[in-house]
Amino acid sequence: MSDRLTAAMISQAADRLRPVIRRTALEPNERLSGLLGGPVLLKREDAQVCRSYKVRGAFNLIASLTDDERRRGVVCASAGNHGQGVAFACARLGISGRVYVPSTTPRQKRERIAALGGDRVEIVVGGGTYDEASGAAHADSERTGAVYVHPFDDVRTMAGQGTVGLEILEQAGQAGQAPGTVIVPVGGGGLISGLAVWLREHSPATRLIGAEPAGAASMRAALDHGGPLALPELDTFVDGAAVGRVGDTTFPLVKDLVDEVVPVDEGAVCTEMLDLYQTDGIIAEPAGALAGAAARDLLPHSPEGPVVCVVSGGNNDVSRYNEVLERSLVHIGLRHYFLVTFPQRPGALRHFLDEVLGEGEDIIAFEYIKKNNRETGPALVGIELERAGDLDDLLSRMKGGPLTVERIPPGSPLFTFIL
């Protein structure tokens, strides 16, 4: 097996996958087209088998195993979507497997892995992050001889995921126009590596942009460093793309073939998730909204030709939408938090309500932190605005009043206790 991905491998993977997976739609999106002032198309991998593109790479790798490897079974690590792809392939091909997941994996994804794999697949919790689960899965592979099915850093996985790019060009060609820009979510780099290899051979003029979560920008860090390195901290909110270290095989392809890799604020991801749901009727997981969120930032650049955004997955737990809404409101400037020190006397709160809050400004959270003496007591106060531009007036009224007010800025470590 070659250690360098080629377009021929992607073509072979497409032949292998064609009877098994869906050829997902490439459809116009009016909302994003209006924002960018030109055509935007969504590649709907949220409608794929297992509701994610990950099944492409997992199935292609497992279907490529020798008879001896199949008898030994497979093992993998996954934040959820790759595990579903492995479970689907194991059940379809009659192979036993174990899926190691981090404890942060949403319950909905764990339940889907179990349902897809049936009695062929065992789920094992292997640490608090993807990288810890990966270490546990590698140890299992060394101990038992099971084949490790890598979610991104294996050319067989990358070839399967690269078939997304093959379909995009075929579908765009049928519509009569090649894409000018393709935006792809980035975690470990498997999907964007596969697309890069296919696009550079078959549509070299297409601009390829990777979008990764700002709190897990491992590819950007690798590019700046000159090679893969482990991030010291990792925000796992965008769980489908929260990888602490990108692949040794994917990195050089991204470095050589991808035009740009951009970090996307998690709040922007949440805003795009809500717009996809409320306007477009699309349920996207956080990673599935990365490309659309990045596309909004292209607005000042006026991209030439159609823009394709890959909606990579739709496995989102409905219980997370409260946090999604909170992060979005903070990001767009409608929700703000403050530490307000109130004098412990009657009427102090009434003064705050009457003299500080303006029309259309609502308290959405109020909690005394502690009473540190008899005269004063600090409180956490959350305020929601009608318009983001009203913040300056609110801050001015706070500054002119008798109370001590400290704003908690977005990104502050204190926000971990709020969100």
Image (cartoon, rainbow, N blue to C red):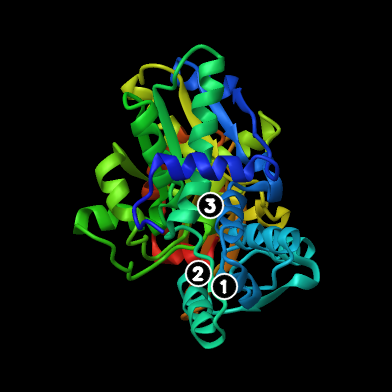
Residue named by callout 1 = 102
User: Does dot 1 land on a helix, a strand or a loop?
Assistant: loop
Compared across the picture, whether 182 is left or right of 366 comes to left
Residue 73: x %, y % from top left:
63, 74
Dividing the picture into quarters, in which one does residue 389 lie? top left
Query: Circle 2 sits in a helix, a strand or a loop, which is it?
Result: helix
Residue 419 vs 37, above or below: the answer is below
Q: Is residue 346 visible?
A: no
> Which label's residue is closer to the chain start, 3 or 2?
2
Tell me the mark number nearer the camera, choosing from 3 and 2: 2
- Amino acid type at mark 3: Phe
Q: Residues within 10 Å of mark 3 (few under 14, many from 20)?
A: some
Please give the name of the residue rendered at 54% of the width and 82% of the height, measured from the top-left corner: 145
Q: CA distance from mark 3 to mark 2?
A: 45 Å
Alpha carbon distance from label 2 to label 1: 5 Å
**What is the distance, in whole Å, between disc 1 and disc 3 at their CAs?**
45 Å
Labels 2 and 1: the sequence-earlier one: 1
Q: Is residue 380 above or below residue 262?
A: below
| Residue occupying the point 39% across, 22% down | 180
Q: Quadrant of residue 246?
A: bottom left
> To which residue does mark 2 refer?
130
Crowdedness near tag 2: few (<14), some (14–19) or many (≥20) residues, C-alpha within 10 Å: many
Give the residue number, with chain letter if any, for mark 3: 352
Which badge, 1 or 3, is on the more N-terminal residue?
1
